[in-house]
Image (cartoon, rainbow, N blue to C red):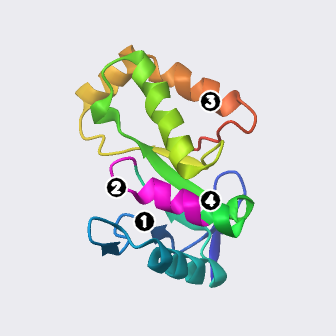
Amino acid sequence: MHYRKDKYGRDLSILGYGCMRFTRNGGSIDLPKAEKELMKAYESGVNYFDTAYIYSGSEDALGRIVEKNGIRDKINIATKLPQYLITGKSAIDRYFNEQLSRLRTDYVDYYLMHMLTDIAMWEKLKALGIEDWIKEKKASPRTSIFML
């Protein structure tokens, strides 16, 4: 596997594993198959795993697999703030804490804005205090690592 340094000097695999389309069995993720595929990627050197709040069941599946295999400190998890669902300041923390719970971790390595498509949405988030929220989370040791 080839790696690139992020702006903090950490090695990231040039290939990431997208968790949006885990195989489904009926209406839910086929967890044994997802685990087999994800662990094969990990064993092949992939250390960047991407998921999102709206990828149905994905955060939970990734969290279960990572926890079961004890690899949290060896990988980077990226997930995304569902800002289009944010209706008030408290919702930012509510969604973030729900995501940490689903992922079975106390931090994420990369927290991205999902589908930030216009200036108006960014201005709405700024009015709700998103910039201060990001600074607060970045400053909080091992609660979250934000690399925006």
Horizontal side of 46 relative to 25 (left or right) equals right
Secondary structure of the residue carrying tag 2 is loop
For the residues marked 2 and 4, what is the alpha-carbon distance in whole angstroms? Answer: 18 Å
The answer to whether residue 95 is magenta is no
The disc, 3 or 1, on the residue closer to the chain's N-terminal end is 1
Q: Which mark is residue 137?
A: 3
Residue sitting at 46 percent across and 75 percent down? 34
Which numbered disc flags the more N-terminal residue, 2 or 1? 1
At label 2, the amino acid type is: Tyr
Query: Dot 3 surroundings within 10 Å: few (below 14), some, or many (20 or more)?
Result: some
C-alpha distance separating marks 1 and 4: 13 Å
In terms of sequence position, does the residue under pointer 3 or pointer 4 come before the other? Answer: 4
* Label annotation for residue 96: none
Quick one: label 1 or label 4, which is nearer the N terminus? 1
Residue drawn at 52 percent across, 54 percent down:
78
Residue 6 vertical position relative to residue 124 in the rendered view, above or below = below
Amino acid type, label 1: Cys
Tell me the residue that label 1 is attached to. 19
Q: Which residue lies under the disc numbered 4? A: 76
Q: Decide which of tag 2 and tag 3 comes sooner along the chain.
A: 2
Q: Label for residue 55?
A: 2
